[in-house]
Image: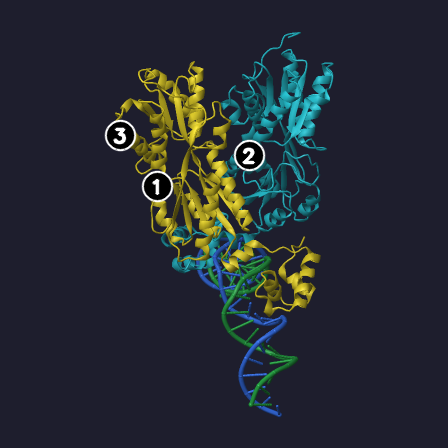
Chain colours: A cyan, B yellow, C green, D blue
Amino acid sequence: MHRVSIKDVAREAGVSASTVSYVLNNTPTETISGETRTRVMAAVRKLGYVPNLNARSLSSRRSNLIGVLIPQTEPGREFMFSNPFYGELLSAVEYTARQRGYHLLLSGTQEDQSYLSIARNRGVDGIIIVGTYPGENLTELKRMDVPVVLVDSYVRDEDFHIIGIEDREGARMAVRYLIGKGHRRIGFISGSIRENGVNMKRYQGYCDALQEAGLPLEKGAVYSGTVDYEYGLRAAEEYVRRGKAQSAVFLTADVLSMGFVKGLRQMGLGVPDDVSLVSFDDVYLANMACPSLTTVHQDIREKGRKAVEVVLEAAADREKRHTEWILPLRLVERDSVREWREGE
Amino acid sequence: MHRVSIKDVAREAGVSASTVSYVLNNTPTETISGETRTRVMAAVRKLGYVPNLNARSLSSRRSNLIGVLIPQTEPGREFMFSNPFYGELLSAVEYTARQRGYHLLLSGTQEDQSYLSIARNRGVDGIIIVGTYPGENLTELKRMDVPVVLVDSYVRDEDFHIIGIEDREGARMAVRYLIGKGHRRIGFISGSIRENGVNMKRYQGYCDALQEAGLPLEKGAVYSGTVDYEYGLRAAEEYVRRGKAQSAVFLTADVLSMGFVKGLRQMGLGVPDDVSLVSFDDVYLANMACPSLTTVHQDIREKGRKAVEVVLEAAADREKRHTEWILPLRLVERDSVREWREGE
DNA sequence: TCCGGGAACTGAAACGTTTAAGTGAACAGG
DNA sequence: CCTGTTCACTTAAACGTTTCAGTTCCCGGA
């Protein structure tokens, strides 16, 4: 079965292949007569022709393809979306890209290199990398001269575009809120706190808030593991084992909260009656949870949309090496915090 | 900046381009000497060469790309993953594909045609379509002579591969379970019940179970809308408005349950105290919910894995026009159902 | 009548691979 | 010494576009 190509259309319409190409890419209208144009389009329709995008990419060096790299949080674990945040972000990215006539080349990533060399040679027009990557790949990335947008990464580099949020400020906002509700001893639960990582930033915000309220920083109030439901469960156990010293907790992701709440419940404790908590992200889950979560809201759709816009702008104008977009945060009050009275 | 091509490697290694190609695709080892092989590999490494996959696809008519089409449930709504089921499925698909050396070309779909003509011309090696599509596209799909796997679709066609579950049987299992717990009046909440659709199948299962227990089918016990959290909320309101006639409810998706539970709670009703419910899918959310959901479990990872395997097998052997895989279901008992005593 | 110039195309090279077919050297068998 | 095989490559033709550089043709102006 012969796939119909541009030549078939040309023959059918009685013109050359290049004319067909010009019509299809509607080059400035003056150079092709209306009559030819309609004849070509008729042939296209009649034969059911659709261009071969591989050939187009090869020839034009544009692919209308955006590479998207999403972290696979644990090696060997299928569910890269163990945190629904990624699903929502991806969804927003896909939607925006599709509106603009782009498709997504999706790859999960463990912390291996392979994904890079692959993603690059599809000839993608740009790459959106979500999350945090070790620095050694970056030089490789630079070599390929393709616009790169780093979403939620701690890396700062003059050759990459950045989309992020005020992690530190957001965390401070959350903890300050708890303090405003009367809490004096506040825990911190997060993924692994690595130098310059997102969790580190949020930890700093946590410290900031305590400090400005003159509250002590307790070593035993900090829990650090992985960002998923299971760790939330474990953190709850640990919290009880350590003696339930804090009346409130700040968690760096909503999924963590989901696990934490569940873990507490299994041990007979309730939120917010026994422990208050505020978390981070405001994934749609946060509102579904019970209690619904008071959380630092970030606009995930906007983040995804922005990522696509930035990558496409940079693709159109390769002079743009570096832009930085820090999206605003706000606290959403729901039902996971209660007031704490002095001496309770 | 010149992208290094196979010719550069050839020059560097002092061989022809085709030799390089043969080495890279490691054709049967006898035909290339070990010495040449190492020299080529050295050149590849030295120059940092990586093949251009577009060119490769164009020439070899294989792309190592799988097209994945995920329904965007509502037009204009970014979150195609409003049902986390899709995220989990996609994740499993991506993981399996990556293991096999394939990448994913992702596109959301409204019920328009455009996505098809696009997906096809990337020269994907196969297409995985999730959910249900109107029939008119199918003839178009057939024309493109590419293996197609339909996941959770009602369409049966000798030219497509099918992966699904026993929807009807699963629903029956769920409702039978409720009956076993003593419930006599049981509601049904689902997305729109269209001819031959998944929801129709589950509705039939619901009817089966009632019938075999000699229970009447009540018109007012059926709620049909869209498969998302919001409709779950609205269904709860409607349930109360109609007089809370049923002591238990079967919902066709976990997200629906999430909304329903929340909606009830807002009106002062509790699950399972006032209403029992069992739902469908066993998305990871189902276990996080409170109460955790008794639900019909389907193995989403397995579904995704199978989809990739089938599509790749079919790509390797174009004689395989049609296979059908119906994955098993089982009921997972959690905390959303309580026993109902006669005359309560 | 000739010339210049624009409109409306066409020709052909290029994009970077794969792969069928071809080539030459080495070598074994007779 | 000739012939046939095998080994280890190389040649060149695709694959289906885009796009630069022509080429025709026609028309208006001098």
Q: Is residue A87 visible?
A: yes
Chain letter behind tag 2: A
Amino acid type at image mark 3: Gln
Q: Quadrant of residue A129?
A: top right
Q: Which numbered tag is attached to residue A82?
A: 2
* Percent of width and height locating residue A90: 54, 36
Q: Residue at x 43, y 20 (%)?
A: B271
Towards the viewer: B28 or A39: B28
Q: Is residue B246 above or below residue B280?
A: above
- Horizontal side of A320 relative to D3 (left or right) equals right
Circle 2/circle 3 CB separation < 8 Å: no
- Per the image, label 3 sits on a secondary structure element best described as helix
Q: Is residue A316 visible?
A: no
* Percent of width and height locating residue B145: 40, 54
Q: Residue at x 55, y 25 (%)?
A: A258
Circle 1/circle 2 CB separation < 8 Å: no
Label 1: how many Cα within 10 Å (few below 14, some 14–19, many 20+): some
Q: What is the distance, in whole Å, between disc 1 and disc 2 at their CAs?
A: 29 Å
Amino acid type at image mark 1: Tyr
Q: Which callout, 3 or 1, points to the residue nearer the camera?
A: 3
Q: What is the distance, in whole Å, between disc 3 and disc 1 at their CAs?
A: 24 Å
Q: Which numbered tag is attached to residue B154?
A: 1
* Percent of width and height locating residue B240: 36, 16
Q: Which numbered tag is attached to residue B211?
A: 3
Chain letter behind tag 1: B
Image quadrant occupied by the C terminus of chain A: top right
Label 3: how many Cα within 10 Å (few below 14, some 14–19, many 20+): few
Q: Which callout, 2 or 3, points to the residue nearer the camera?
A: 3
- Horizontal side of A88 relative to B46 (left or right) equals left
Q: Which callout, 1 or 2, points to the residue nearer the camera?
A: 2
Q: Which numbered tag is attached to residue B55?
A: none
